[in-house]
Image (spheres, helix red, strand yellow):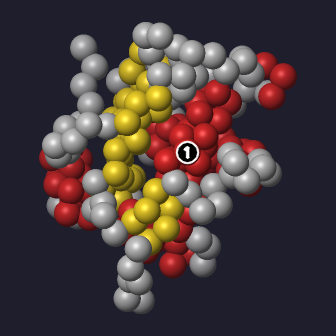
Amino acid sequence: MWWTLSLEKGVPKLDEATCIQIINRVRTYKLNEAKIKNIAVEVCERLGVHHYEVSLQFVGPQKMRALNKEFREKDKSTDVLSFPQYEWKVPLKIKSSDALPKRRKVLNPMPLGDVVISLDDALGNAQDSGHGLDQEVCFLMVHGILHLVGHDHMKAKDKKLMFAEQDKLMKILSDKPKKISFHKCVTPLKKREPK
């Protein structure tokens, strides 16, 4: 039976037509849930898992540190964690736009897994890399969903494949119209002090 990481009290929002669940546990960031959902749907469709349910959870560094310690035995926060529900024999690859199915309502989606993103860590990454927070959050969503469909980066060969798929998906999302693009998908509500 599928479980969702129960981070705190609250009812998550679930869109039955697209099977994307968004849970925001951080009050210092405003999420554009429609954009985040559109990004996740696009990624899932491109990977051929549009009929699965994905939970996207946005947390602070303390919660992420606790999860990282519990599940990876690393006592520090991290930017993204993925909790896949399946072990794939072969990682899924991006489908061409010609092979994409029409969007339709899925009545009984199968759980694909959870992606948990620390927004403070994402902001730190964005500042270090010189790009925007919204691009970093999109990148972490793509990275996390790729882990849900069997990708990993522990071995050089696997890393090369995963990062190539990641780059392709980011290019696809960068070229999308504003409704689907990652621009303005998340906004900090307070200024963070530079490192």
Residue 188 position in % (x across, y down): 44, 72
> In what element is the residue under mark 1?
helix
Depth order, front residue of 107/78: 107
**Residue 136 seen in the figure:** no
Image vertical order of residue 184 relative to residue 124, above or below: above
Quadrant including the C terminus: bottom left
Q: Type of residue at label 1?
A: Ala
Residue 114 position in % (x across, y down): 36, 36
**Residue 98 seen in the figure:** yes
Residue drawn at (26%, 64%) of the image: 61
Residue 46 position in % (x across, y down): 67, 30
| Label 1 neighbour load within 10 Å: few <14, some 14-19, many 20+ | few
In the image, farthest residue toward the bottom: 194
Depth order, front residue of 77/180: 180
Residue beneath disc 1: 34
Quadrant including the N terminus: top left
In the image, farthest residue toward the right: 98
Depth order, front residue of 62/188: 188
Residue 23 position in % (x across, y down): 34, 44
